[in-house]
Amino acid sequence: SIMPASLSAISNGAKNGLLFKGGVHLERLSRAKIIAFDKTGTLTKGEPSVTDVNLREGIDTAELFSAAGSIENQSNHPLAKAIVEFTRQVEGVQLKRTEVTEEFGMGITAAWGGNKYFIGKAEFVGKEEALTFADGAARQFAKTGKTVVFVRDEKGIAALFALKDTIRPETKKAIESFKLNGIQTVMLTGDSEQTAKSIAQEAHLDSYRAQCMPEDKLNEIKQLKSKAGVTIMVGDGINDAPALALADVGVAMGEGSEAALETADIVLMKNDLQKLSDAIALSKKMNRIVK
Ligand code: ADP
Ligand code: MG
């Protein structure tokens, strides 16, 4: 019978920082053909910080940073937290409570100090103007794997923040070992094409899809299942929950959102992707023993 082998494997998993919600998932891991990863918080630490700022000429910096900081202070997005932290350190900046509207995967908007602000990706603030702002600075930042957030006021693009997140220390080695186990690797991200490309290259992934809205991640998993076969999805965000649910095996990062943890079949307690790779190797070995 399969029970003793799979039970011992499960308890092994728990010791090694993996939580399995049922025995069927371990067996499925051994048949995985492709693994899809969210970027922010999954392949990367999810703790970006502001590295560069470009401002429109003549702008009142204390006013601009007070607005951007106050508005982003109402968001839980990791990019928002980094922007708040940055603005707090600027002289003359005062953060105030303000009412905002957040559009998930796009950005955030609010009225502040008699002006209306849009803060977010190029598509959210007006793509053409965003991409030519400061002599096309956004493209150069994105090429080095930085994420760019634009601020628009009633006069046009007012500022650009470049933010850098770091790849988790275990990511590259884990990606290599997935590949050695014959599993294709793909990244699904809401970030821009250039930023996605740079991170995918740095992490040695086989492929990537940029500009994914949550429903795009879901559709991508649907496609992978029908074209590639048994599909694993690894993610941490609320955005990832539908894709985690649809995947043959959904894996959540331990420090992920509640929605991701609840939906997933396996939880990586210490956010260590290498543990998932070890579990796949174990599951392949176990299948050989049982058969
Ligand atoms: P990811 O898949 O990389 O975790 P999201 O889907 O959460 O990214 O967001 C996609 C993009 O939308 C971000 O890269 C950013 O440009 C923009 N965005 C979303 N929310 C915010 C926010 N609160 N402030 C600034 N930008 C935001
Ligand atoms: Mg994420």
Image (tube, helix red, strand yellow):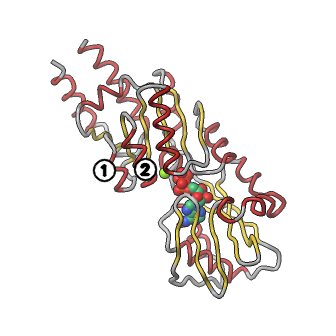
Residue receiving disc 1: 262
Q: Amino acid at mark 1?
A: Glu
Q: Residues within 10 Å of mark 2 (few under 14, many from 20)?
A: many
Does the rendering let one see residue 82? no
Q: Secondary structure at mark 2?
A: loop
User: Where the N terminus falls, by quadrant?
Assistant: top left
Residue receiving disc 2: 236
Q: Earlier in the sequence, mark 1 or mark 2?
A: 2
Vertically, is 65 above or below 51?
below
Image side of residue 265 versus residue 50, left or right: left
Pick whichever, 43 or 210, lies toward us.
210
Please identify the quarter of the rendering in which residue 267 is found.
top left
Image side of residue 218 versus residue 117, left or right: left
> Could you say where residue 171 lies in the image, as x and y percent from the top left?
51, 38
Vertically, is 181 above or below 255?
above
Instruction: Name the residue located 43 percent from the left edge and 31 percent from the top edge.
Output: 231
> Could you say where residue 77 lies in the image, as x and y percent from the top left?
50, 63
Pick whichever, 109 or 43, lies toward us.
109
Mark 2 Cβ and ligand 2 under 8 Å apart: yes
Q: Disc number at residue 141?
A: none
